[in-house]
Image (cartoon, grey):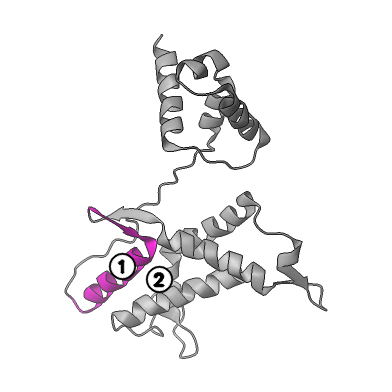
């Protein structure tokens, strides 16, 4: 977690420095020449990115014992291989796509745009700044509703859609396991369509 937060602070500092703001002058956090108060401020609206990166690492079960080392004080620290996994997941989150101002970009680019908007607000070129937009929308295949759809799907109905029994059997195992999973777009579309038809008949 500490590694991701440090990595995130570096991203915020890069955005702040690129627009010419002083990273030591913050609004929410105490100003101190030894602290990057504005970077901490900029982190707050986007802290969910850090949380999601950690949650993804846990759900994907990519971390194991060899990624950590126990110190003499019995605390755990990341080995280089573990640090690389954490960094890659954080980078993946920052590069994930989001729509903002009718354009598709990454959360990293949104962070930079928000720093620019803040700069314009500070110098009086912009009256307001909105940090609640864009809104993060989680698009998960393993939601409770979709799990139920998979479990309830009869094999005969699945076969009528043109899919094999083995595919549904594998999906049912994943849905009942409690672990995270993903679906191909065309499979998810057919599955969601079946449920709508089922309710109408």
Q: Secondary structure at mark 2?
A: helix
Count of number-bearing discs: 2
Q: CA distance from mark 2 to mark 1?
A: 9 Å
The quadrant holding residue 44 is bottom left
Q: Which residue is mark 2?
A: 42
**Among the two numbered marks 2 and 1 on one chain, the one whose residue lies closer to the N terminus:** 2
The quadrant holding residue 5 is bottom right
Q: Position of residue 52 (x, y in %)?
A: 52, 56
Crowd around label 1: few <14 · some 14–19 · many ≥20 (10 Å): some
Relative to residue 54, is residue 78 drawn left or right?
right
Relative to residue 8, is residue 63 drawn left or right?
right
Image point 65% across, 31% down: which residue?
A: 173
Quarter of the image for the C terminus: give it: top left
Relative to residue 154, is residue 177 drawn left or right?
right
Q: Secondary structure at mark 1?
A: helix
**Residue 154, visible in the rendered structure:** no
Circles 2 and 1: CB atoms closer than 8 Å: yes
Numbered badge on residue 114: 1
Q: Considering depth in this image, is 167 or 133 the residue closer to the camera?
A: 167
Q: Is residue 31 above or below residue 114?
A: below
Q: Position of residue 188 (x, y in %)?
A: 45, 32
Q: Which residues are magenta?
A: 102-124
Image point 46% across, 37% down: which residue?
A: 184
Q: Position of residue 134 (x, y in %)?
A: 33, 55
* Furthest residue in direction top, as rendered: 201
Quarter of the image for the N terminus: give it: bottom right
Image point 46% across, 77% down: which residue?
A: 10
Crowd around label 2: few <14 · some 14–19 · many ≥20 (10 Å): many
* Magenta segment main secondary structure: helix
Image point 29% across, 68% down: which residue?
A: 113
């Amino acid at each position: 977690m500490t590694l991701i937060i440090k990595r995130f602070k570096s991203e915020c500092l890069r955005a702040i420095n690129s627009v010419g703001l002083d990273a030591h002058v913050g609004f929410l956090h105490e100003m101190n020449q030894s602290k990057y108060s504005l970077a901490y401020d900029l982190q707050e609206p986007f802290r969910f990115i850090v949380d999601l990166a950690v949650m993804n690492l846990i759900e994907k079960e990519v971390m194991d014992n060899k990624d950590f080392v126990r110190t003499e004080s019995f605390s755990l620290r990341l080995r280089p291989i573990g640090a690389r996994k954490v960094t890659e997941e954080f980078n993946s989150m920052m590069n994930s796509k989001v729509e903002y101002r009718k354009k598709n970009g990454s959360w990293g680019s949104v962070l930079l745009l928000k720093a620019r908007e803040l700069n314009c607000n500070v110098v009086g070129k912009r009256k307001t700044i909105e940090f609640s937009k864009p809104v993060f929308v989680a698009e998960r295949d393993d939601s409770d509703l979709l799990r139920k759809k998979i479990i309830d799907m009869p094999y005969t109905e699945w076969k009528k859609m043109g899919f094999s029994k083995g595919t549904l059997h594998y999906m049912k195992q994943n849905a009942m396991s409690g672990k995270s999973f993903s679906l191909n777009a065309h499979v998810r579309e057919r599955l969601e369509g079946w449920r709508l038809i089922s309710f109408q008949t």
